[in-house]
Image (tube, grey):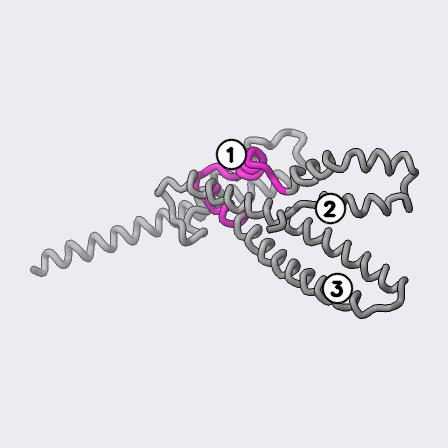
C-alpha cells in the first residue's frame, strides 16, 4: 500500500524541472535537500497545537466556566468536522479528475498537449498529497477537541442546550472585560461592556424573581392540596 502524504517521489520528479526557474547551483542544492524538505513538509504545523487550543482558544477570561469551555469545544470540533467533510468531497473530485486526465493522456497524440496534461496530473497528484496531510491534521484537532470536551464535562451543566449556561458564563465574561477597562479605554468600548453587563445583571435578577415566584406558586398549590385532603 502506498504511504499517504509521501511527496518524496513527487519532489524528486519535479526537481528535474526546477532548472526552468532556478539557477543550476540552486537546483543542485534543492536535490540535496529533498529528504529534509520532505520531513519539513510532513511535520509542518497546519492547525493549532494542543497548547494553543488550551491557552489561546479556551483562555480563562474569555471562557471562565467549564460549560463555556465545553460549548466552545463543540463549536470548534464541528467546524473541523465540516471542513473535513468538504475536504473529502474535494479529494474525491480531484481523484476523478486524475482518472479523466490519465485517460485523456492515453489517447492524446500531440506532444505539447501530452506535456500539458502531464503537468495537470502532477499538480493534481501533489494537491492530493496536500489534502491527505491537511485531513490528518484536521482529524488530530477533532480528537483533541473531543479530549477537551471530556476534560471540561464535570457533570454540573446542561450538555444538550447551549443557552442554559450562557447567562452565568456571560456574566463572568463581562465582569472580566470590565476589569480590563482603563482610563485609556474608548467610550464605545466602555459603553458596550457596561451596557452588556448591566443588561445581564438585570436579566439574572428578573429570572431569579420569576423562578422565586414559580417556587412560591408551586408551594402554595402543594399546601392547598394538602389542606383539601
Dot 1 or dot 3: first in sequence order is 1
Q: Which residue is mark 3?
A: 102
Residue drawn at x 53%, y 52% is 78
Between 78 and 114, which is closer to the camera in this rendering? Answer: 114
Where residue 164 sits in the image (x, y, percent)? 41, 50
Q: Which residue is mark 2?
A: 9
Please say whether residue 198 is visible from this viewpoint. Answer: no
Secondary structure under the numbered disc 3 in the rendered image:
helix
Residue drawn at x 49%, y 43% is 170
Residue drawn at x 57%, y 40% is 193
Where residue 35 sits in the image (x, y, percent)? 72, 36
Secondary structure under the numbered disc 1 in the rendered image:
loop
Q: Which residue is mark 1?
A: 60
Residue 51 magenta: yes
Q: Nearer the viewer, mark 1 or mark 2?
A: 2
Determine the CA span between mark 1 and mark 3: 54 Å
Where residue 48 sits in the image (x, y, percent)? 60, 39
Task: Residue 111: give its label.
Answer: none
Dot 1 or dot 2: first in sequence order is 2
Between 93 and 49, which is closer to the camera in this rendering? Answer: 93
Amino acid at each position: 500500500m502506498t504511504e499517504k502524504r509521501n511527496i518524496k517521489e513527487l519532489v524528486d520528479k519535479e526537481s528535474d524541472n526546477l532548472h526552468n526557474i532556478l539557477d543550476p547551483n540552486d537546483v543542485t542544492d534543492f536535490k540535496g535537500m529533498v529528504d529534509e524538505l520532505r520531513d519539513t513538509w510532513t511535520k509542518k504545523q497546519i492547525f493549532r497545537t494542543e497548547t494553543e487550543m488550551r491557552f489561546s482558544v479556551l483562555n480563562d477570561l474569555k471562557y471562565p466556566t467549564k460549560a463555556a469551555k465545553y460549548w466552545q469545544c463543540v463549536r470548534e470540533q464541528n467546524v473541523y468536522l465540516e471542513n473535513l467533510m468538504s475536504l473529502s468531497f474535494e479529494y474525491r473530485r480531484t481523484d476523478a479528475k486524475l482518472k479523466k486526465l490519465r485517460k485523456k493522456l492515453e489517447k492524446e497524440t500531440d506532444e505539447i498537449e501530452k506535456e500539458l496534461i502531464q503537468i495537470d496530473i502532477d499538480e493534481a497528484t501533489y494537491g492530493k498529497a496536500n489534502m491527505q496531510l491537511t485531513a490528518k491534521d484536521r482529524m488530530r484537532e477533532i480528537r483533541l477537541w473531543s479530549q477537551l470536551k471530556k476534560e471540561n464535562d464535570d457533570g454540573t451543566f446542561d450538555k444538550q442546550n447551549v443557552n442554559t449556561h450562557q447567562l452565568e458564563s456571560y456574566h463572568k465574561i463581562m465582569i472580566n472585560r470590565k476589569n480590563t477597562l482603563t482610563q485609556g479605554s474608548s467610550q464605545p468600548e466602555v459603553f458596550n461592556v457596561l451596557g452588556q453587563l448591566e443588561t445581564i445583571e438585570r436579566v439574572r435578577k428578573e429570572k431569579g424573581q420569576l423562578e422565586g415566584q414559580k417556587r412560591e406558586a408551586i408551594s402554595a398549590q402543594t399546601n392547598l392540596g394538602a389542606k383539601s385532603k
